C-alpha cells in the first residue's frame, strides 16, 4: 500500500476529566478528498487541532508522509504544508478581505502576497469583495474568505472544519466545485462536516468518529449503509 499523506495513530486527548479523543486513528490518501463525520462532541475539531498542532496529544502520533509532526509547533506544521479553516471563522473584522488574506502570508513579500490573494479571490469568485471590511460580509462570504486564507499558504493538505455549515445549498455547491478544482490541482482535502449529502457525495473515503474513537471507515456507499453510522447519525 502506498504511504498515506496523513496518518493519525491511537490519538488520545483529555481535557480535565473529559476524554475528547480515546485512541482515534485515521489516514488520508494523497490527492484524496477524505471526510470525517460524527455526532456533536465526538472529537472531530479536537482531532484537527491536534493534527495542526494547536493542541498537544496526550498520547498517540500524527505522521505526515511518514514523518512525525505531533511534537512540532503549529507554524512548523504549517510550513510542512498543512493548513486549516476554523469551525467559527476567525477573520479580522475591521480589515478588508484583501488585508485579511495578505495578513496570513507574512513569509512572502508584499507583492507576492497580494498576487496570491488575488488568485485566491478569483478562484473563489469573490474579487468584488476585495476592499470590503470582513465585518460587513455575510456568514457565507466569511466562510469563503476563511477558505481563501488557507489558500494563501498553498497547502498540500487542507483541513476544513465544517465548511458547509449554516450556508445555503447554492453556496454549498459552489464550495464543492472549488474544492474539487483544488483537488484537481493536486491538493489533498480532509473535511469535517455534518452535511451527509455533501460528504457522501464528494469524498473518496469517510471516517466516522463517535466518542473519540473511529467506529467505521470506508467509501461513501459503505458508510451510508453501515448500521453503526445509521445508529450514531440518523
Ligand atoms: N479546549 C477544550 N477544553 C475543554 N474541553 C474541550 C475543549 N475542546 C473540546 N473539548 C471537549 O471535547 C469534546 C470534543 O469536542 P470537539 O469540539 O472536538 O467535538 P466536535 O466533534 O468537533 O463537535 P461539533 O460537531 O459540535 O463541532 C467535547 O466534549 C468538548 O466539550
Ligand atoms: Mg467541531
Image: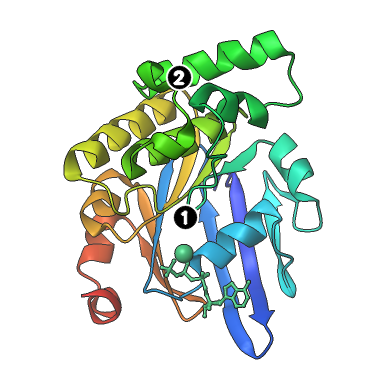
Q: Residue at x 81, y 58 (%)?
A: 71
Residue 87, label in figure: 1
x, y percentage for residue 17? Answer: 65, 91
Q: Which residue bears the numbered disc 2?
A: 130
Q: Earlier in the sequence, mark 1 or mark 2?
A: 1
Q: In the shown orientation, is residue 112 left or right of residue 76? A: left
Classify 180 as above or below 73: above
Classify 223 as above or below 104: below
Q: Mark 2: give few (<14), some (14-19) or many (20+) Cα within 10 Å.
A: some
Q: Residue at x 27, y 74 (%)?
A: 233
Q: Mark 1: give few (<14), some (14-19) or many (20+) Cα within 10 Å.
A: some
Distance (Cα) linking label 1 and label 2: 22 Å
Residue 31 in view here: no
Q: In the shown orientation, is residue 230 left or right of residue 128? A: left
Q: Nearer the viewer, residue 183 or 149?
A: 149
Residue 158 in view here: yes
Q: In the shown orientation, is residue 229 left or right of residue 135? A: left
Q: Helix, strand or loop at disc 2?
A: loop
Amino acid at each position: 500500500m502506498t504511504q498515506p499523506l496523513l496518518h493519525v495513530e491511537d490519538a488520545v486527548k483529555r481535557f480535565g476529566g473529559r476524554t475528547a479523543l480515546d485512541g482515534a486513528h485515521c489516514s488520508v490518501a494523497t490527492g484524496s478528498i477524505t471526510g470525517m463525520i460524527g455526532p456533536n462532541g465526538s472529537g472531530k475539531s479536537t482531532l484537527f487541532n491536534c493534527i495542526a498542532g494547536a493542541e498537544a496529544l496526550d498520547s498517540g502520533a500524527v505522521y505526515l508522509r511518514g514523518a512525525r509532526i505531533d511534537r512540532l509547533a503549529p507554524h512548523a506544521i504549517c510550513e510542512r504544508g498543512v493548513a486549516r479553516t476554523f469551525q467559527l471563522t476567525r477573520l479580522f473584522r475591521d480589515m478588508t478581505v484583501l488585508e485579511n488574506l495578505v495578513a496570513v502570508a507574512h513569509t512572502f513579500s508584499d507583492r507576492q502576497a497580494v498576487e496570491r490573494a488575488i488568485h485566491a479571490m478569483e478562484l473563489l469568485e469573490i474579487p468584488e469583495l476585495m476592499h470590503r471590511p470582513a465585518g460587513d460580509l455575510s456568514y457565507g462570504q466569511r466562510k469563503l474568505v476563511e477558505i481563501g486564507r488557507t489558500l494563501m499558504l498553498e497547502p498540500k493538505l487542507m483541513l476544513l472544519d465544517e465548511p458547509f455549515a449554516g450556508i445555503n445549498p447554492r453556496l454549498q455547491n459552489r464550495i464543492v466545485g472549488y474544492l474539487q478544482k483544488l483537488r484537481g490541482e493536486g491538493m489533498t482535502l480532509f473535511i469535517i462536516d455534518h452535511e451527509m449529502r455533501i460528504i457522501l457525495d464528494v469524498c473518496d473515503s469517510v471516517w466516522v468518529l463517535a466518542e473519540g474513537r473511529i467506529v467505521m471507515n470506508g467509501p461513501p456507499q459503505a458508510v451510508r449503509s453501515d448500521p453503526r453510522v445509521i445508529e450514531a447519525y440518523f
